[in-house]
Image (cartoon, rainbow, N blue to C red):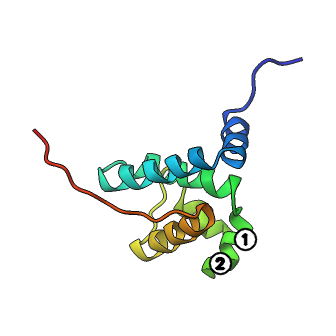
């Protein structure tokens, strides 16, 4: 019996049982996008989608092919702002959160 578990299984399981964790991941994805780390943000969004709505259902909700959504949210993906907005809004509704952004001064 293996003691090692795939990290995706661990993340998916936690997202499904802990709404606060899922919300924190969405918050982190937004922060990463706005602070210049889009690759990591896309991968977090991918995990959230896999554990919540799934890519097939997201394809229906966005009227975009599932394969296109997979490519958009890969590490080297290049989604448009319109597509990102659509994805964030769908996740926001599923997780029952509102996204508010605040700026703070850097010293």
Of 7 and 89, the residue lying toward us: 89
For image coordinates 63% across by 82% down, the residue present is: 63
The N terminus - image quarter: top right
For image coordinates 73% across by 68% down, the residue present is: 56
Other residues around mark 1 within 10 Å, as few (<14) / some (14–19) / many (≥20): few
Report the side of 10 relative to 93 (left or right). right
Measuring from the top left, give residue 92's x and y in whole percent: 53, 65
For image coordinates 52% across by 47% down, the residue present is: 25
**Helix, strand or loop at mark 2:** helix
Contact flag, marks 1 and 2 (Cβ < 8 Å): yes
- Outermost residue on the left side: it is 107
Residue at the disc numbered 2 = 61
- Outermost residue on the bottom side: it is 63
Up-down relation of residue 10 to residue 92 (above or below): above
Measuring from the top left, give residue 3's x and y in whole percent: 79, 17
Of 25 and 55, the residue lying toward us: 25
Other residues around mark 2 within 10 Å, as few (<14) / some (14–19) / many (≥20): few
Report the side of 97 relative to 2 (left or right). left
Residue 57, disc:
1
């Amino acid at each position: 019996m293996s003691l090692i578990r795939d990290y995706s299984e661990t993340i998916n399981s936690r997202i499904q049982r802990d709404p606060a964790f899922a919300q924190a991941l969405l918050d982190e994805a937004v922060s990463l996008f706005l602070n210049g780390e889009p690759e990591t943000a896309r991968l977090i969004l991918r995990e959230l989608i896999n554990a919540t709505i799934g890519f097939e259902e997201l394809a229906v909700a966005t009227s975009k092919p599932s394969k296109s959504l997979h490519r958009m949210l890969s590490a080297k993906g290049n989604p448009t702002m319109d597509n990102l907005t659509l994805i964030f809004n769908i996740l926001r509704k599923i997780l029952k959160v509102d996204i508010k952004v605040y700026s703070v001064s850097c010293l």
